[in-house]
Image (spheres, rainbow, N blue to C red):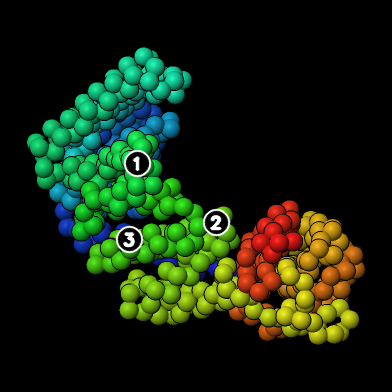
Amino acid sequence: MRRIFPICTLSVVFLGFLNSTLAQSNTSIKDSTYIEAYIEGLSAGTARLIGTYGDQNYIADTTVVDAHGHFILRREKALPAGFYYFLLPGQKSFSILVDRHDQHMTLRAKADDIPGTMQITGSVNTQLFYRNARFQNAQEPELKQLSQILRDSPPNSPEYIKAKARQDELIAQRKAHLDSIYREYPNAFFTRFKIAGQNPDWPEFRKPNGELDTLRNILYYREHFWDNVDFSDVRLLHTPVIANKLKRYIVELTPQHPDSIIKVADPLVQRVLPYKEYFQFFVNWIALQYENGKTKVMDGEAVMVHLIDKYFTPELAFWDTPENIAKIRKKANEMKASLMGRKGPDVRALDINGQYKSIYEMTAPIIVVFMYSPDCEHCREQAPEIQRIYQKWKDRGVDIYGIALNTTDEKWKEFVRKNGFTFTNVFDPTNRAIYAKYFVDITPELYVLNKDRIIVAKNLQAHQLETIFERELAKMGN
């Protein structure tokens, strides 16, 4: 595997805005932090306070634990409000939830059961966090047992009906427990944190024949998925809630096809556009999710290209410099020509005999553009398979146009001879023949063009080609 065009700028930008956000949060809050803990039975060592921003964790602070399990974390500048956990000696840990003015607390627990024995004074939000956690933990064994019964029992059987009724009862108790906290502490950060994390109730829309209307249920669920999130509350970005919801919304609730992802992501980004911190996180997270070379979605980079085109502009991308934005946009522009559904650009370059060969001069109904480097280990592994596939399919409407990259004339010709390539192979040491035509991040790269020279598949491995050939030839009635 050989990386041809590194595309790391976007990742660097993401890490940069994370650090920038944390720095801004720290310097903008003036209250001090004082957290004292007594963890009976804890070994001496270092306690690390781990913070959260989006889906990233970072070391917010450290302090020393003495031989009695006692430690104090004191800060002149307060922590950004959010969710944190302490990593302790002996692979122990526990979580806290802090607001801007809720950072003076004393914590007492036993090392062998920190969650079950935790006592908190001074922090309303951390008290509520453990109050709720203990209620849920007490229910968990029975809920797991009921879930197993529901999986093992036929629907509408007495066992199933009984287990479902009990499950509904426990879930109702959990909801009532949270509702009582919400009423008692309507303005607590814990309340905002828990409400934001709640998903909408799954609807039970049915078709006229009584069957569940699955599509309508999914659309309703997705439409109301963000109803409980207050996008003006930046504190939520410092908890796992937002990143977890974003991942579920984009990756799990959306069909993983570029057009579907764009259709769902675009309105969401528009929705958070007035909220700078959320806009910054959402547009970067989604773009990185579908970065070329990382995504497993075929043509997933179309999502990234769309977002960069629309939102990574000097006017909107306030978190970065014009120079970096220009680099990101340039890279996206290089990808545009080779997105699926577009006409594959022509390439004209010298072949191994010194003759100019062009993709558009080839007459086969299906053309494979095979981009490789002789120094690439995976290219060497797949080369014999590519030649085998060509021999099998060349009389059935398939031709291959090989493009050597990042090599020398001598190495290229030796690679062609060694692998017995009998299909067209070209090499342009200047790369001018392929620049901004067929984007390649990691070799080998395979594109498939149909009879109209539209890109119908990409980011393939050799063993996937024949399935694509059969599909495209069937469309033509062959």
CB atoms at circles 2 and 1 under 8 Å apart? no
Tell me the element at label 2.
Answer: loop
Amino acid type of the residue that numbered disc 1 sits on in the rendered structure: Lys
Q: Nearer the viewer, residue 476 or 214?
A: 476
Q: Residue at label 3?
A: 268
What is the x, y in percent for residue 409?
83, 78
Q: Is residue 373 above or below residue 382?
A: below
Mark 1, Cα crowd under 10 Å, few <14 / some 14-19 / many 20+, is few
Q: Quadrant of the C terminus?
A: bottom right
Residue 207, disc: 1
* Mark 1 / mark 3, whichever is N-terminal: 1
Would residue 48 be visible to someone looking at this image?
no
Amino acid type of the residue that numbered disc 3 sits on in the rendered structure: Leu
Residue 474 appears in which quarter of the rendering? bottom right
Q: In the shown orientation, is residue 143 left or right of residue 355?
A: left
Amino acid type of the residue that numbered disc 2 sits on in the rendered structure: Val
Q: Residue at label 2?
A: 297
Residue 204 appears in which quarter of the rendering? top left
Count of marks, rendered view: 3
